[in-house]
Image: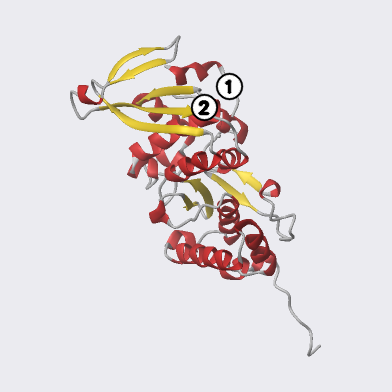
Amino acid sequence: MANEVTVTKPQDMNLQQLMNSGAVMKKLNDVLGSEKKAASFVSSVISVANGNTMLRNCNPMTILGSAMVAATLDLPVVPTLGLAYIVPYKGQCQFQLGYKGLIELAERSGQFKNIIDEVVYEGQLVKKNKFTGEYIFDEDAKTSDKVIGYMARMDLVNGFSKTIFWTKEEVEAHANKFSQAFRAKRGTPWVTDFDAMSRKTVLKALFAKYAPKSVAIQNAIKFDQAVVTPNEELTEEDLQIDAFDTEYVDNDVPAGEVTQEEVKPSGDLFGEGEKKEGETKNDKKGEK
């Protein structure tokens, strides 16, 4: 018929069509609080995707999923800000929480008085006690540029404090276990900026095990480094992040185990590929 209208299904839409669809724009307006902010966010997502060859070749539904997680957390995906990223991996996209984004979410909760994370060089770890969880670091005691590990500390407004330390070898073991890209030495942030990824991993482990769990922090930890795919109908219910399909493609371990490992030892960065709750017998390592 001459007046017949063809309706494009969401799974057949390109990224620009998906991001500008009525359901997506309505949801973005709801979570971001204004049409202007929603339009700006959509523009930034499309710009980021168009600026990266691998992203342009990714499944647009996974880009949308990552974007919706970032929007729900109110974290922009502009790479230079370091808050959140949409990272291509084998034709799909992962949401990746930025190192600065993790700190931002913690500060928003109003429950943190102080957050510290640092690279620890040879000589700076003066004392540690695995039974009491006590650590003493001395910045001026550095004896070389050799990195021996990474520390993270939080002080809460209620008076609770906690410090953890992972050796560099423990962080490498973690990356080797959970990142195929790291094992293959591809252009993952684990390879291009190991210190930043290490600092984020140790800080995330601290928060996952010991910090007060705001909804935002729980969601950030859940979706970090996951391929997130909305249901194909794109109804209002389908665009709730709790309804998204989540897959951790850059590891060989089921998602539940990946979440567990993040609280154990062994950038947040916009890379070309890359890559977790519970407790096992190895969890004590995180307190050494």
Residue 195 on image: x %, y %: 33, 37
- Return the residue found at the far left: 143
The image quarter in which residue 196 lies: top left
- Decide: is 65 above or below 220: below
Q: Which residue is drawn at 56% across and 57% down?
A: 63
Relative depth, front residue between 152 and 194: 152
Count of numbered tags? 2
Write down the residue under mark 1: 279
Q: Residue furthest right?
A: 1
Nearer to us in this view, 68 or 126: 126
Q: In this view, does 140 lie to the left or right of 233?
A: left
Disc 1 marks a residue whose amino acid type is Glu
| Residue 275 appears anywhere in the view | no
Label 2 crowd (10 A; few <14 / some 14-19 / many >=20): many
Quarter that holds the C terminus: top left
Left or right position of 142 against 221: left
The residue indicated by pointer 2 is 263
Callout 2 amino acid: Val
Q: What element carries label 1?
A: loop
Spatial distance from mark 2 to mark 1, Cα to Cα?
A: 7 Å
Is disc 1 surrounded by few (<14), some (14 to 19) or many (20+) residues within 10 Å?
some
Residue 104 coordinates in the image, percent (x, y): 48, 44
In the rendered image, which quarter contains the N terminus? bottom right
Q: Where is residue 148 in the image (x, y as percent from the top left)?
A: 29, 25
**Position of 45 relative to 220 (above/below):** below
Check if mark 2's residue and mark 1's residue have beta carbons within 8 Å: yes
Q: In this view, does 103 lie above or below 44?
A: above
Badge 2 or badge 1: first in the primary sequence: 2
Query: Is disc 2 placed on a helix, strand or loop?
Result: loop
